[in-house]
Image: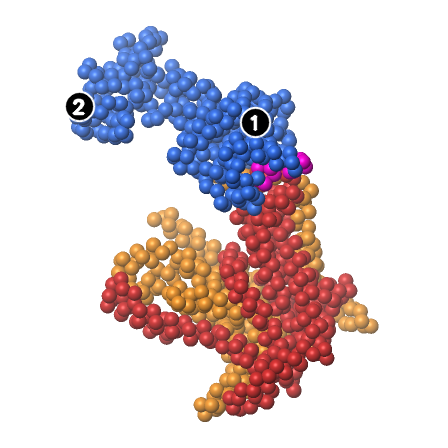
Chain colours: A orange, B red, C blue
Amino acid sequence: MKSLFRQRSGVFSKITTVPFLLLVIGVGGYSWAQVIVMAFSRLRIEAGQFVWSPAGFDNFRDILANDVALYSVAVTTIFVIATVWLSVLLGLLLALLVQRSKRFNRLAQVVLLWPAMVAPVVVSLIWLLILSPNIGVLNKLLDTFMLPTQDWLGMEVGAIVAIVIVDVWHWTPVAFLMLYTALCAVDEEAVEAARCDGANEWQVIRYVKIPMLMPAILGTIFIRAVMGVKAFDEMYLLTAGGPNNATTLVSLHIRDVFFDQLNYGYGSAFSVLIVLLMSLIIALVLTVRTLRHSRFFMREVQE
Amino acid sequence: MTAGSHAIKAEVATRSKLRRRHSLSDMTSDAVLVLLLLGFVAPIVWMIILAFQSDRAIISMFWEIDLTLDNVASILSPAEPFRAQLVNSIIVVTGTVVLCGAASTLAAYSLSKLRLSGWLNAAVNVSCAVVPLLPPMALVPGFYVTLIQTGLLGSLTGLVILNTILNLPFATLLMKIGFDDIPPALQEAASIDGASEARTFWMIMLPLSMPSLITSSLFTAIMTWNEFLMGLTMTSGGTTSPLSVGIASLVQPYEVRWGQLAAAGSLAVVPIMIASVVASKRIIAGMTRGAVK
Amino acid sequence: MASVEIQSVKKFYGALQALHGVSIQIEDGEFVTLVGPSGCGKSTLLRMLAGLEEISSGTIRIGAAVVNDLPPKDRDIAMVFQNYALYPHMTVAENMGFALKLKNADKGEIRSKVERAANILNLDKLLDRYPRQLSGGQRQRVAMGRAIVRAPKVFLFDEPLSNLDATLRVSMRAEIKSLHQRLGTTIVYVTHDQVEAMTMADKIVVMRDGIVEQVGAPLELYDRPSNMFVAGFIGSPAMNFLTGDIRANGFMTGTCLFPIGENRPDLHGRSAVYGIRPEHLRISEDGIPAEVQLVEPTGSESHLIVKIADQAITCVVRDRVDVRPGDLIRLSPDADRVHLFDPDGENRL
């Protein structure tokens, strides 16, 4: 029986949430309010002080007229789609392999934590040491095998492929861990029943394990997509958005306009737009999910 | 492609002998796994190797080995800001772990075990769900202005507060899951034994939630140690910035000291690699439990 | 020690009513069990006594004081929980002494009280262990020790034996009963197991759907159940019920006539439910013909499931009988132990 007991609320229960709310709603919410106000203002710095003046929708109009801004949304979309699919597929493959393996099971779980735990800044260092045209080990390897060397980060396509690979390398372990945990939770009896029904290893994976993993896979896709939109650190150091803005993710664009061009209103407006766009997509995903659930439910009821 | 070939082999093996362990396909899948693992580890190992290579050997087009401690030594020399940045990072990490630990434990306890008014409950729950979805970069302009207004821009206190805000939702979620696992009968037993709300928390619930608190603190510590964006945008660089920003500043447009770069990166990575070996179970549990919710 | 008085207590969870005005008088030093199927409100009532649930209406007195608005700690009660609720991070001694420690009792006093309680419960050697190092039965005893140490006015037990295996349950049953005889403290004990209730209690409260069905001593409930629910709930195997009509010469169901001990002319001609316990039926030459459907030997006795007038009836026989399914036997009810019920209200006639 679930207990309905909750202690009579005294002073203690009233103050428990105070620090949380003060920090997240107080400081966080206040800061976000500042972003919204700035988005509708023109800001200049005079004698070290901000001077605010109302700007209406000017900042938003500027965004729509700015090729780099629109381009950054496109680049981010491509980046998110590519990294999500690659890291989820690779994570799923790793999860299946690690679960099968008796010898490397423990080792793999520890080793695969490393890329995810390493600071993003260091991740970009690690990959600079590999991709650098001068001292990078990739070119060194190519040279050893008499193949032509390239300035990988200096080419547009090369730079995009590079940031995708780096991100997949960095965050696949997270996808792996989530899928591996879900895989371990799959009812072993269902797998054994399938084997008794004559399913081979591939059929077990295809028709039993993956369908049962579906909720975990969808959850991983969602989390990885959010991480993709958030990405900043690695690309800031690796390509800084270049060459020719080929790798300008939205977060790189915000930093650039806010801190380098000192265009505060525009940067804030772009932040607001990105958050709105994200909320819209998340709301859409949730609606579709709820609709599908209810339709599924209806079908079950009819049967 | 690897998945396909592996599967075909597995199929052949299953057919050939029913319940016998298909050793051939096991070996194939292990081989694929080892190759993948190498792909994930090799880049890190390569950086650590370069940390002990002389600049001459690094630049050379040939595979030279010229081991030296110069890179590490020069990074740690008093002339470099590295030491000050290391101290900054330690201060920020400690402050964030303490502040975030206290705030998340209290909030999670009241969410899980106390009767809260509806809107308080909703406020905490909604922030826990929304904040992790926001790109930190979108919040940077607001944080920047707030810190200027409060005079905390460029200070370690400011960084502690921002890191705490970014980590609080996840930490609270982890702690709430931990508190949910403690049977409510213990709270009832304590109230019959005569303990007040605060004493029940302090003497029963806090000791019992220690494992979750350690896990969530470990997470907060790693996230804060790795944090770069706030350090970059809210400090003025040099000796005022945390370690992550210091490492990034070694990448200069023109003359890059590759050996020092690798040495600094290795110094930042090794503690975390050790932590993940020692506490891998905790980290995995924290990552997956928090994410599933 | 104190008496407990529960007066027309009601409990609402939103629109749902869990208790519909319950009144029970518990004397000082009495061992009372609240028994009933799950969801009958017995645990809710106990938790209201403890102060863990708010009372929607009505009053509860412990001793002379109304405790409705007192927090648990001011009610001077101790509770033994179903899952024991021992503090995992405290030793046995710390668990038992926690309430005294909260009252800022002197260390030596705590030690001596804990040791005395441990002695009563044979926990002397376990005082420095942690709950996880104890067996189920030992944890159960620690939970009781924690209650004893406080010397409360009333002990509350919430299904304390339901997590123990069958053998341990029987021995703990005896242990709790002898503890009650030794301490003489009022006990309110919740269980869903009627055997537990029958063997331990001075007084049993049978509850169903938030209503008290009957209050009485164990044998009183067995001998004179006031309605069909109590009749069926108390006793194992359960009482048989047959539907039919009361005639001048007995009870008619189908073509079979069952004897009724006491002649009740006022009931002649009305339809009724005839209740007879399986142990009050015996095989005899001049009985009512019955077809054996199933034989369940338990060793000491056998349960026969037979068919009379198309109704299934259980019968307990102590002697070994050589019958098989399909055999015809004759059964005689003990006419003095027949219960008659109203088929509509299900109450005793």
Q: Which residue is mark 2?
A: C328
Q: Is residue C127 above or below residue A268?
A: above
Labels 2 and 1 share a subunit? yes
Q: Is residue C82 above or below residue A66?
A: above
Local SS, label 1:
strand
Q: Is residue B27 left or right of residue C155?
A: left
Three-letter residue code for mark 1: Val
Local SS, label 2:
strand
Q: Residue furthest front?
A: C125
- Closer-to-camera residue (B73/A132): B73
Q: Residue furthest left?
A: C327
Whether residue B176 is visible, yes or no, is no
Three-letter residue code for mark 2: Leu
Main SS class of the magenta portion in the image: helix
Q: Name which of mark 2 and mark 1 comes first in the sequence.
A: 1
State the residue at coordinates (36%, 20%). Answer: C343
Q: Do tag 2 and tag 1 residues touch (Cβ < 8 Å)?
A: no
State the residue at coordinates (52%, 24%). Answer: C182
State the residue at coordinates (33%, 73%). Answer: B5
Q: Identify the mark at residue C154; answer none if there is no mark.
A: 1
Q: Nearer the viewer, mark 2 or mark 1?
A: 1
State the residue at coordinates (58%, 72%). Answer: B269
Chain for disc number 1 = C
Rendering quarter of residue A54:
bottom right
| Percent position of residue A242, x then y | 59, 81
Q: Residue furthest bottom?
A: A146
- Closer-to-camera residue (B142/B28): B28
| Percent position of residue B91, x then y | 69, 65
Whether residue C97 is visible, yes or no, is yes
Instruction: Please report the bounds of the magenta region as a residue range.
Output: C94-106
Rendering quarter of residue B213:
bottom right
Residue C96 among those drawn in magenta:
yes
